[in-house]
Image (cartoon, rainbow, N blue to C red):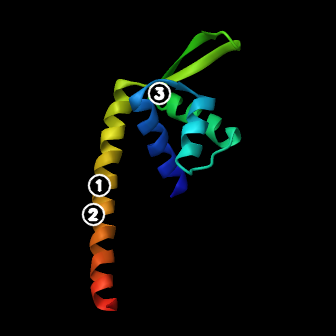
């Protein structure tokens, strides 16, 4: 479940703007989702191999060039599907939670 959520969160972040791995890790950390490079890099590679991401090398003033990841058109479509699935799951869980709260009160 966490793996699927992590994919979703990464695609959400990259939908806003292209980012490099360190930025992605920092933004996830700010959202209280702790991810290490050893988890992120293989996932980014798999998403790229699946055609959901592309990357470009950008020169850096603070060291070597950085690999910036961005969503492909296919990635945008896939993210839309994840959005729909998340909304449906969220509605279902919220419905069940409300039903249980009524019974517990």
In this view, 22 is above or below 29: above
Q: Which mark is residue 91?
A: 2
Q: Residues within 10 Å of mark 1 (few under 14, many from 20)?
A: few
Earlier in the chain: of badge 3 and badge 2, it is 3
Q: Which residue is mark 3?
A: 53
Say if 61 sits above or below 23 in the image.
Answer: above
In percent of width and height, residue 56 lies at 54, 14
Residue at horizontal 59 percent and vertical 45 percent from the top: 29
Question: Which residue is denoted by mark 1 in the rendering?
Answer: 87
* 10 Å crowding of disc 2: few (<14), some (14-19), many (20+): few
Lower position in the chain sequence, tag 1 or tag 3: 3
Please tell me in which quadrant of the rendered image residue 46 appears: top right
Judging depth in this view, the residue of 20 and 41 nearest the camera is 20
Mark 1 and mark 2 residues within 8 Å of each other at the beta carbon: yes
> Under tag 2, what secondary structure?
helix
Place of residue 13 in the rendered image (x, y in percent of width and height, measured from the top left):
45, 35
Q: Residue at x 51, y 34 (%)?
A: 47
Q: Image quarter for residue 80?
A: top left
Q: Quadrant of residue 73?
A: top left
């Amino acid at each position: 479940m966490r793996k699927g959520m992590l994919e979703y969160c990464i695609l959400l972040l990259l939908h806003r703007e292209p980012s490099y791995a360190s930025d992605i890790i920092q933004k996830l950390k700010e959202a209280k989702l702790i991810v290490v490079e050893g988890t992120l890099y293989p996932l980014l590679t798999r998403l790229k191999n699946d055609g959901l991401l592309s990357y470009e090398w950008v020169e850096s003033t603070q060291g070597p060039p950085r690999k910036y990841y961005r969503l492909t058109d296919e990635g945008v479509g896939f993210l839309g599907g994840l959005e729909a699935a998340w909304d449906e799951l969220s509605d279902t869980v919220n419905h069940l939670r409300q039903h249980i709260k009524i019974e517990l009160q």
